[in-house]
Amino acid sequence: MDLVRASPDGVLDLNEVAKRLGVRKRRVYDITNVLDGIHLIQKISKNVIQWIGSDLLGKIPEERILREELSDLSAMEGALDELLKKCAEQLYELTDDKENANLAYVTYQDIRSIQAFQEQIVIAIKAPEETRLEIPIPKEDCIEVHVKSTKGPIDVYLCEVEQEKPGDKLCEDVDSVTLEAEPSVPPAKGRSLGKEKQQTT
């Protein structure tokens, strides 16, 4: 068993084992026949065996570990696929219902209630369908955001998630974001839209 523990992947040459233990090969074969009978080893060739047990060695063969990981990942993938399917169905039902369309919005209080946003800068964008949002790789001193629409105006708001102070606006038009749209699109509320592509900082 010490030789099995020390061998790569639990593979042993029985001729080598007999030499190292100083016993006859017949005696080694008697032992391996018993271990094979109770499925703790498997014969790879006439004189080579591999340990396939687990707890007795204190380790599990790598192949078995990978099979178990693959099985777990497959189960997780199936669960995620099912969740995505249910979310898509619920989203379709929500947006397909005309009565629900008027309620498809979030408030500033909704945003503030999300714990993950408490220490973040939150930018809310209200834009028509097929609006493109691109965020290039951030630079050391700034982050750029590009928003482009060809079907209507874009409203962008900076929602500061912090302690309220008397007289402060809860959610105001953002001043540091430049938008882009086609010339025929009317200006977004509180913002002027450029006719050419502009860099957004």
Image: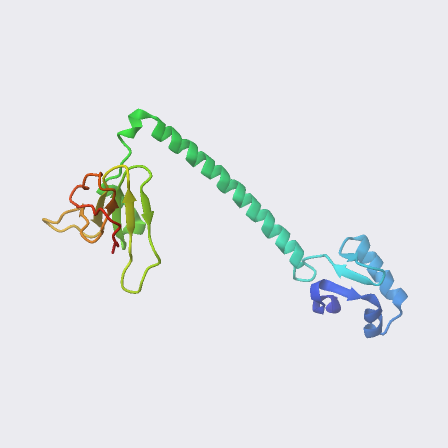
The answer to whether residue 139 is above or below residue 175 is below
Q: Nearer the viewer, residue 144 or 120?
A: 144
The answer to whether residue 87 is above or below residue 158 is above
Residue at coordinates 81% horizontally, 53% vertically from top-left?
A: 37
The answer to whether residue 188 is above or below residue 27 is above
The answer to whether residue 73 is above or below residue 49 is above
Q: Nearer the viewer, residue 5 or 94?
A: 94
The x, y position of residue 147, in whole percent, is 28, 47
The x, y position of residue 74, in whole percent, is 57, 45
Q: Quadrant of the C terminus?
A: bottom left
Say whether residue 112 is visible: no
Residue at coordinates 82% horizontally, 71% vertically from top-left?
A: 16
The x, y position of residue 88, in whole percent, is 42, 35
Identify the image quadrant of residue 13: bottom right
Residue at coordinates 81% horizontally, 69% vertically from top-left?
A: 17
Q: Nearer the viewer, residue 24 or 42?
A: 42
Say whether residue 178 is visible: yes
